[in-house]
Amino acid sequence: MMDLFDAIGSDPRDVQLAPGAMLLGGFARAFETPLIEAVRAIVQRAPFRHLVTPGGHRMSVAMTNCGAVGWVSDRTGYRYDAIDPDSGQPWPPMPDVFTRLAHEAAAKVGFADFRPEACLINRYEPGAKLSLHQDKDELDFAHPIVSVSLGLPATFLFGGMNRSDKTTRYRLTHGDVVVWGGPSRLAYHGVLPLPDGEHPLLGRQRINLTFRKTR
Ligand code: MD3
Ligand code: FE
């Protein structure tokens, strides 16, 4: 017998956070072991590092990338670059489990054929935060960004099209996937300082993956 959720095509853990922003609660949990293994392998080749902003501030979040291009920041600006500036080598390739997860999540909310060529990997240790910003270094904002949260829970801030717009707080926990498209794609967003804690798989950290089409 078809139930109400089948009838409206939704899952009780899926919540629209804002127009174009769909939370798929716990969607990545089914992939947690291969995802974490893949992160460990990437970090062996492209270790986490604290980037410097064009303004000269060292970011508290540590970052690395995989895929054909990676997001980097230095005193000269922000850009996507095919070469890891620390190693002088290409970024590690995107693991199949990453590509599949991003594709399936995007498809579930109506973005067919989402094939990201970049994945930015953020590592938050207790106290690390990400100030309000827009993601606008990509060329085509018709493509969504897919985010995956792993490890310790964080408070995510979601604002509007102007930095001064009021923000709403959401708690993002292990396995949560959010597809940020449509009117949400250029919204200001950030992450409050990570509270200390201990996650059974990842210990005292939060890892966030963001899948992007950059070109
Ligand atoms: C809304 N990462 O990498 S994930 C980032 O938790 C970033 O590490 C945060 O902001 C993190 O740029 C937030 C959620 C997220 C990611 C990208 C977005 C929300 C977004 C792009 C546009 C709008
Ligand atoms: Fe962002």
Image (tube, rainbow, N blue to C red):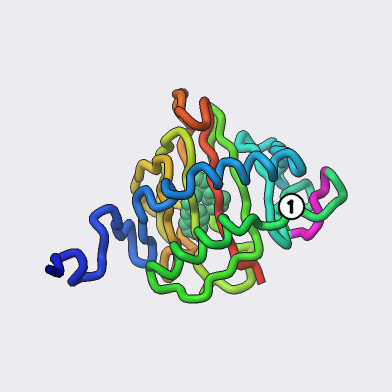
Whether residue 158 appears in magenta in the rendering, the answer is no
Query: Residue, x 34% and y 48% (percent of image)?
Result: 168
- Is 66 situated above or below 51? below
**Residue that sits furthest to the right in the current view:** 88
Inspect the image, locate mark 1, and give the three-letter code of the amino acid beneath it: Pro
Whether residue 84 appears in magenta in the rendering, the answer is yes
SS label for mark 1 = loop
Residue 123 percent location from the top left of the image? 59, 38
- Is 57 situated above or below 188? above
**Residue that sits furthest to the front in the current view:** 1
Looking at the rendering, the stretch of residues picked out in magenta corresponds to: 81-86
Q: What residue would you read off at disc 1?
A: 92
Horizontal arrangement in the rendering, residue 115 relative to residue 185 (left or right): right
Residue 145 percent location from the top left of the image? 51, 62
State the predominant SS element of the stretch in magenta.
loop
> Looking at the rendering, which quadrant does residue 7 occupy?
bottom left
